[in-house]
Amino acid sequence: MNGWTVEKLASLVNVVYGKSPAEIEKLDDGFPIFGTGGVVGFTNEIVCDGPSVILGRKGTIDKVQRCAGPFWAIDTTYYTTPKREFDWSWLYYAISSFDLRKLNEASGVPSLSRASLEALEVATPPLDLHPPSRTSVMERKSINQENDGHEEEQIY
């Protein structure tokens, strides 16, 4: 693989614990609230500006999700924040290629540890091979800041 490297997920992103949904007000509209199975509601508060890949920590551990903008992730999930520049869609597909059920560490309710996720070895392309039509994580953050943190279009 010309220019590709194999790296641990921990070298690309921080894997962060979601927060209790008891801390937020649920609304009919606003920023998405991600649970392990998908969007479970909306709120006016966020834990991450996005983009991010969201993963199940307890329960549904094999459904990889992504969000391009700000969101709340509940405490049964992990979300990712970048350590360096890359295309966030690529990361979503890279993590989706793993059978995360094989990392289950519980006999009852499926459970996924942060250490297991961080140890995943991911084939990583050089930045110049990322699709030119995509906006990189660092560029997207810059655009968010220029627009006062609001994207014109919300993508889950």
Image: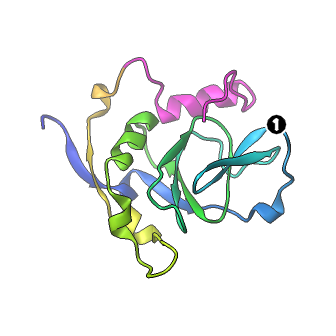
Does residue 82 sit above or below 130 in this rendering?
A: below
- Magenta-colored span: 132-156
| The image quarter in which residue 24 lies | bottom right
Which residue is nearer to you in this view: 145 or 29? 29
Find out whether residue 90 is within the magenta segment. Answer: no
Residue at horizontal 52 percent and vertical 75 percent from the top: 109
Q: Quadrant of the N terminus?
A: top left
Residue 80 place in picture, x, y as percent:
52, 52
Judge left or right: residue 55 versus residue 119: right
Question: Callout 1, which amino acid?
Answer: Asp
Does residue 115 sit above or below 149 in this rendering?
A: below
Q: Looking at this rendering, what residue extends furthest in the bottom direction?
A: 107
Does residue 17 sit above or below 72 in this rendering?
A: below
Q: Quadrant of the C terminus?
A: top right
Judge left or right: residue 129 versus residue 110: left
User: What residue does disc 1 label?
Assistant: 29
Considering the whole magenta stretch, tell me its main secondary structure: loop
Residue 155 place in picture, x, y as percent:
61, 30
